[in-house]
Amino acid sequence: MKYEVVIGLEVHAQMLTDTKIFCGCSTKFGSEPNTQTCPVCIGMPGVLPVLNRKVIEFAIKTGLATNCRISHYSRFARKNYFYPDLPKGYQISQYELPICEHGHIEIVVEENIKRIGITRIHMEEDAGKNIHESSTLGGSGGGGNYSFVDLNRAGVPLMEIVSEPDIRSPGEAVEYMKKLRAILRYLGVCDGNMEQGSLRCDANVSVRPAGQKEFGVKVEIKNINSFRFVEKALDYEIRRQIKVLEEGGRIIQETRLWDSARDITESMRGKEEAHDYRYFPEPDLVPIMVEQKWIDEIEASLPELPDIKRKRFISGYGLPEYDADLLTSERAVADWFEEATASYALSVSGPKVVSNWMMGELTRLLNEDNKTIEECPVRPSQLADMLKLIDKGTISGKIAKTVFEEMYKTGTGSEVIVKEKGLVQISDTGEIEKAVDDVIAKNQKEVERFKAGEEKLIGFFVGQVMKLTKGKANPQMVNELLKQKLSA
Amino acid sequence: MELFRLTISESKDLLDKKAISVIDLVNSIYRRIDAVEDKVKAFVTITKDKALTMAQEVQKKIDAGEIQGNTLLFGIPLAIKDNMCTKGISTTCSSKILFNFIPPYESTVTSRLTGQGYILIGKTNMDEFAMGSSTENSGFHVTKNPWDLERIPGGSSGGSAAAVAADECIAALGSDTGGSIRQPAALCGVVGMKPTYGRVSRYGLVAFASSLDQIGPITKNVRDSAILMNAISGRDPFDSTSAPVPVPDFTAVLGRDIKGMKIGIPEEYFIEGMDKEVERSVKEAIRTLESLGAIPIEVSLPHTGYAVATYYVIAMSEASSNLARYDGVKYGLRSEGKDLMDMYMNTRAKGFGAEVKRRIMLGTYSLSSGYYEAYYRKSQQVRTLIKKDFEDAFGNVDVIVTPTTPTAAFKVGEKTSDPLQMYLSDIFTISVNLAGAPAISIPCGFTSDNLPVGLQFIGKHFDEESILKVTYAYEQSTDWHRRRPDL
């Protein structure tokens, strides 16, 4: 039987605010345990939360960028459950009245644009972390096993972005995650780092016989913390569900945990053990009233988003879709491209030349160093200057690769490098002619064969001339002279 | 006259005139505590050493002429209910689960008092986590009514009210969620005021029911309440529910004429089964107000009958969540167990008393899926109706007058076996918290057993001035507030 897969994603994105959502503590990652805490985020008796305005702004930004309706009246609610990393015994979240609803983003599926609905985006506080360690040093539980609690992360602002069950394959899920991550990074509201946990994903997955209208029983998968795992975990879970159905079994509604060490999902808790979170409106915070004026101001300040930028790169710069996709996946890459292109701006083919260098040499060098475009030692205008040297015939395209590598290594401009290393292209006819004559004289056998019709040997002659001139000869002139002399 | 008998304003006069020293005043209070505390048991913690050190520092400043005349409470010894966090000083909420809790931070109210130069005498006993109407639910001991040591002082701020009535402090702060300031003030024959919700910061007040809790003064007379209100009121950036409303000088209205003031009398508050002596005192008080020129007008608060049920659903729901943090992980009592769940259960089983457990369970139930609509949401809807009752009534009158409690102080142990009877002792005070309105209780007579009777005035939102004005006028024409228990 053929099955259709139905997936909805719940994405948790840590917001890039300087301070926590309800107190003034820093949100910096990786500090000594419990050094970024205060009575409020530790949940001392008597403390009260005070909402960080930046958090609302970031949520509205994200809502606008994902075509959501922004609520003028929204509320926080308490989600009640016991766990040591949750100091108050409840998480302040949103429930009945979230800040953003009814949005969507677009992904490309088999060259067609597909819309994935966003049910809601809400704001909440992150929990701390439990660190489980076994030790014979004292401890408390009798067996010497105990855990530590680090509350540095408690109160770091999160957005939960809930998609509609519109996703139909693990590949689409990955595309959705990538697009969402790109949007969040464009907006500067989340760094999108899945490995450090600043972007996390839970998935609701079900399968149903193709053509059936009702959804199958859904299973929630938690702990998916990389793009690779999104695909792997969903693949595994879909195969598991189909197998159960094929064998005549039934899917149980449950929560499963992705075990990335063993590449499987494992049951965590069933429907009966599901928490009753007893949500109710948070009485310590007043409702959030957002005026249209503020929404308009935020909207006006939004950067150009990936989809629009991509379209502009295609129509405005005449770039192929592939190039536009890659160059707009990160705002900083796109900015780099535009700066280099503006500074180059010689011909209609200019943007494509810049794009080629960025996707080729630049990406290769950055990847080797594990660096991002923000850390690139070469400035966009420096690439443009180098491209101009090629156009002027000062250096050859081949030499340019050497020059560019040197620019990347030292951060020095191309003109200086070319001068210092004596890499200026030889365009003096006399000098080139001498080298061509030399090569012809020394390779008579090949000359014979060429004259006998083996024309592909031209490459061999060019190579020899370039070798003799240490690569500095103008290749076009070499070519012309060789053809002249050999056919003479 | 013994200095411990003084009010805030009297103390301030004598201190200003240098007729007495701060040290004299503080010593007098502690001599009084030594003499009567064994009988009254109003305190959980007595901070004598710190208070005496503080008194010496303050006196030095006075002697050096460093004290500016505009501080409200310089050198005034006050008692604070033990649910307000005091940095470095044990704050227990009279609960075993917080028996060892020493806050690392100061509540907004006590830091405002500190700014006015007050001297902390001690932290007062209360019903555990402010849940109760008799102080019998304290995890440590029962406080006695100074007028009759066989009787309860009311609650939950029973320790604060008893300490004021017994002259163990000049004045005190309490907190009021459903009557916890006004009811014990009434039963102990002192003045107790619950400000408008949002008037006083809750930051540092250990939460019982966040949407109802409010801190307020318990004092020997109306003027002292106005002075304390001046000290503690106003918007606090640490409490989002504190209101950005200007704070007037609450003492400015004292002594103003109440001629022509319209005083609402809600028919629903004068019910069958109300104690005859209480009823007589309250009716007599209304006649006194009339003689001062006030105009009594009948009003109706039609949803009053639903107030107790509504209140308990909301308060318990919020409490069940507010008390989740006492889990043995971070502070307070921890009772070990074989695993995490076991540790949670042992800690909470040992740490909480019976009433607190009852309320956590009922609150958890009301919020559970399948019951939420019928209990919590329905209660919120009724709450809106109760609020509207007051708005309607205040369309016609300036203040509303009622008895504070249906009876005078009852005997220790009389109602402990019947929680519902206990809950009904708040029947006249609860609606006010649901509406968020301000209210004050002042003495208006005594029963034949020489037990105080309280009169409650309810005001419009953020109009504490009207109820202070009318109570002050009433107080000036009577002598009830001058009576003191024999101890």
Image (spheres, helix red, strand yellow):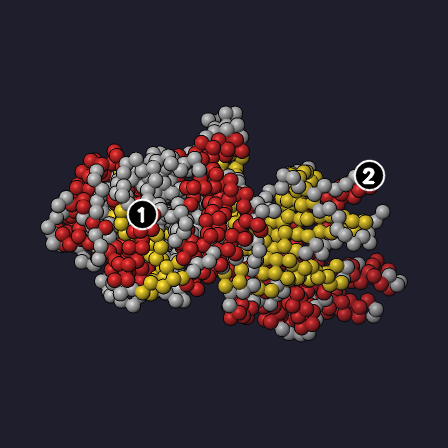
Q: In which quarter of the view is residue A166 placed?
A: bottom right
Closer to us: A146 or B258: B258
Identify the residue shown where x is 35% and y is 43%. B155
Chain bearing tag 1 is B
- Is B445 located above or below residue A396 in the figure? above
Name which residue type carries label 2.
Answer: Glu
Residue at image position (11%, 51%) is B18
The chain that hosts pointer 2 is A
**Residue B365 numbered mark, or none:** none
Place of residue B326 in the rendered image (x, y in percent of width and height, measured from the top left): 45, 39
Question: Alpha carbon of mark 2 to alpha carbon of mark 1: how far?
Answer: 80 Å
**Mark 2 burial class by Cα count in 10 Å: few <14, some 14-19, many 20+:** few
Residue A40 visible somewhere in the drawing: no
Crowd around label 1: few <14 · some 14–19 · many ≥20 (10 Å)? some
Q: Which residue is pictured at 85% across the width and 47% down the height?
A: A1
Q: Quadrant of the C terminus of chain B?
A: top left
Q: Residue A317 occupies which quadrant of the picture?
A: bottom right
Quick one: SS at disc 2?
Answer: loop
Tell me which corner region of the image, top left, top right, bottom left or bottom right, holds residue A275. Answer: top right
For label 1, the residue is B277
- Image spot of residue A424 (x, y percent): 62, 65
Tell me the amino acid under the disc marked 1: Glu
Q: Quadrant of the N terminus of chain B?
A: top left
Residue B400: image x %, image y %? 36, 59
Labelled pair 2, 1 in contact (Cβ < 8 Å): no
Residue most toward the right? A452
Residue B297: horizontal and vertical position, in percent? Answer: 36, 63
**Are callouts 2 and 1 both on one chain?**
no
**Circle 2 is placed at which residue position?**
A247
Q: Indicate left or right for B393 with A380 as reference.
A: left
